[in-house]
Image (cartoon, grey):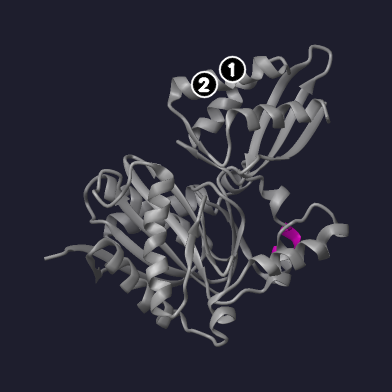
Amino acid sequence: MSERWRFLLTPGKTAFENMAIDWAVLKANSTGSVPPTVRFYTWNPSAISIGYFQSLEEEVDLDMCKKLGVDYVRRITGGGAVYHEHELTYSIVIPESHPVIPRNILKSYDRICGALIKGLRYLGINARYAPINDILVGGKKISGNAQTRKSKVVLQHGTVLLDVDVDKMFSLLRVPSEKIRDKLISDVKQRVTSIKHVLGREMSFEEVADAMKKGFEEEFNVELVEGCLTKGELEDSKSFEKNYFSSYEWNHKK
Amino acid sequence: MKLKSVYKVPNGKLLKIFMDYDAEGNLIKDISITGDFFAYPEEAVELLEKKLRGARVDRDVLFSRINSVIEENDIEFIGLNVEGLTKAIMLCVYHE
């Protein structure tokens, strides 16, 4: 009989709630109060997340965010700035000591990305892991991923692009100069893709979530059992949201 | 004096360094190491920034100071390395 992990479906939350929930689940898992957990989510309103080490004002056009009603948040994971709109975002929280998780960090990216690659295959898409933290289809990026390890627990979260609007993305992200903006946008259009672009038709969040769930189950030989956040997790996530992710100090700390 | 450098680590990520520089003493007054790299544990970067305050802007001094902080604290970088970080810091002052 295969191991049972918790599965959470939490679409439509704010950037601050989403980042707070991932951290709260990590904390709960580190104390042994919840099993390994896979969560799928979306962002409402759409939002930019930046890597833990990035400078907010260096990467993000805050005036444009305000104008377009786009939120922004600093993650607890490293990596780059991401505009979250038409995508499935996943997170996995699991003890570092779990036998499916390689000790080596890059190998563990590879292993977790394997679940998404299997999920994409269910949609008829052939993808591959490209170190450090990308998944590519035909040489173009369809997924970006970021991992942290705290309290002996691994948290990895990342995106699967359902559709992408590179022009909008670059109106929100800061580029080195106006001169190279057009060149940069055309370069990125060559390097980024989405499920819609690959298949030539739209896929709903639910369809993609079904496929990704099967991908995780197959990769890790587990059963994902739908559950909900515990009372403790909800309390922690409220407090992380207030004290970190929605605070000026946290988001502007670099 | 406020200085900045942008440096793409070969086979790695994009580093952006912000430095408050004491030109008279050729010293780092304060430094912020930013970019899309990964570091485990993340708090290690704050420690590095602290340990670099007061350091002379000299390739060998910086390299050995960064290296010893990394070894003493069992820090793992991904998309970044000691050479790249040293180079990016040097670029704030010496633009070649």
Is residue A107 or residue B74 the one in the foreground? A107
| Number of on-image labels | 2
Q: Chain of mark 1?
A: B
Main SS class of the magenta portion in the image: helix
Q: Position of residue B73 (x, y in %)?
A: 44, 24
Q: Chain of mark 2?
A: B
Farthest residue, direction top: B25
Q: Residues within 10 Å of mark 1 (few under 14, many from 20)?
A: some
Q: Which residue is mark 1?
A: B65
Callout 1–callout 2 Cβ contact below 8 Å: yes
Image-quadrant location for residue B64: top right
Please state if A36 lies on the left or on the right of A200 as rendered.
left
Residue type, numbered disc 2: Val
Mark 2, residue position: B69
Compute the Cα span from label 1 to label 2: 6 Å
Q: Residue furthest right?
A: A179
Q: Is residue B76 visible?
A: yes
Decide whether residue A63 is among the magenta residues: yes
- The answer to which quarter of the image holds residue A48 is bottom right
Q: Position of residue A143 (x, y in %)?
A: 52, 64
- Inspect this view and state whether residue A254 appears: no
Left or right: residue B23 versus residue B34 is: right
Q: Is residue A118 magenta?
A: no
- The magenta stretch is A61-65
- The residue positioned 60% from the left and 72% from the top of the image is A193
Question: Residue, x 54% and y 54% (percent of image)?
Answer: A246
In the depicted structure, whether residue B62 falls above or below residue B37: above
